[in-house]
Amino acid sequence: CSSVLGKITDDEVFRGVGGHLILDRMHLGGKVAYVTGAGQGIGRAFAHALGEAGAKVAVVDMDQVKAAAVVTELSLKGILAFPIAADVSKPEDVQRMIDSIVSKWGVIHIACNNAGINMNSNSEDTSLEEWDQTFNVNLRGTFMCCQAAGRVMLKQGYGKIINTASMASLIVPHPQKQLSYNTSKAGVVKLTQTLGTEWIDRGVRVNCISPGIVDTPLIHSESLRPLVQRWLSDIPAGRLAQVTDLQAAVVYLASDASDYMTGHNLVIEGGQSLW
Ligand code: NAD
């Protein structure tokens, strides 16, 4: 007596029919995923999390050496993975990435569009080159990945897209400047909301994760490093996020446990946006 959607009913869940406990519903066994910007930082942690939860993972980065190193790490854990060198700001690279996953594994269930860059100049000094470069990776790149993966997923009638936005999509973190970054990430949230509502009736969910300040190589760049001490006093949690603080969220959004969630911006920032 399953529901009209062919899914297990609430009553069956509470009686433990088929052992559908919550951890089973978050298991990603048999799923195919990719993660962009997976050569280091948050993307690397997402690739590990999805792989540990059972998915096969295509590790995508413009830095081929870093992508290959993460594949080696995953393989040592027994996770099936392969590297793809691709720049998400280039349409031909995005299509090649999608085609190579489909030709290797036949399907794409989970698309993790995480690659992003951050430059931190004063707004009055922001050049059009900086603006365009930031938007080409953060927003146009995310759009192209969503569209190319989405086409495959819509044909399958199933897919989970998880974009990496930022707390900077909601607030203007003080005393950072990063006009182009903040604006591009606000665009990622709106992109996520629009696709998430447009595609849900065809089986594709689109959500995003907005981390606060995460201890990755990105924040140790020359322009951001001096701000780290200042940020600490802005975070109610009293510390920067570690990449491990984000891992369960990506598994949840990639799994069937989050089927009723779409277009959502999951903010994980130690309370900083509420301070
Ligand atoms: P990072 O700089 O440590 O790592 C980014 C990875 O993406 C690198 O391996 C890099 O080679 C790759 N990359 C960059 N541009 C690319 C492109 N065009 N195509 C393919 N790969 C590319 O960054 P991170 O801190 O891990 O950030 C990952 C994502 O999280 C970004 O979208 C970033 O904006 C977002 N984010 C980071 C923080 C933070 O505090 N670190 C906070 C909020 C959001």
Image (spheres, grey):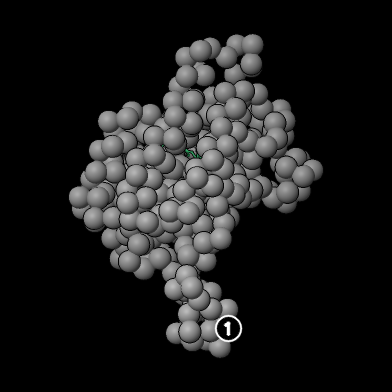
Across and down, in percent, residue 242 comes to: 57, 51
Q: Residue at x 59, y 19 (%)?
A: 121
Q: For the residue carrying disc 1, how many other residues have a C-alpha within 10 Å: few (<14), some (14-19), or many (20+)?
A: few
Answer with the quarter of the image where residue 10 lies.
bottom right
| 215 up-or-down from 254: above or below | above
| 2 up-or-down from 137: above or below | below
Across and down, in percent, residue 9 comes to: 53, 78
Q: Residue at x 29, y 33 (%)?
A: 93
Q: Amino acid at mark 1?
A: Asp
Answer with the quarter of the image where residue 36 lies.
top left
Q: Nearer the viewer, residue 70 or 181?
A: 181
**Secondary element type, mark 1:** helix
Q: Which quadrant does the C terminus fall into? A: top right
Q: Residue at x 50, y 76 (%)?
A: 3
Q: Nearer the viewer, residue 20 or 71?
A: 20
Number of numbered tags placed on the structure image: 1
Residue 139 relative to residue 71: left or right: right
Answer with the quarter of the image where residue 165 lies.
top right
Q: Is mark 1 within 8 Å of ligand 1?
A: no
Q: Residue at x 26, y 49 (%)?
A: 101
**Furthest residue to the front?**
4
Residue corresponding to mark 1: 11
- State whether residue 72 appears in this view: no
**Furthest residue to the right?**
275
Across and down, in percent, residue 248 comes to: 53, 60
- State whether residue 262 appears in this view: yes
Across and down, in percent, residue 135 comes to: 49, 25
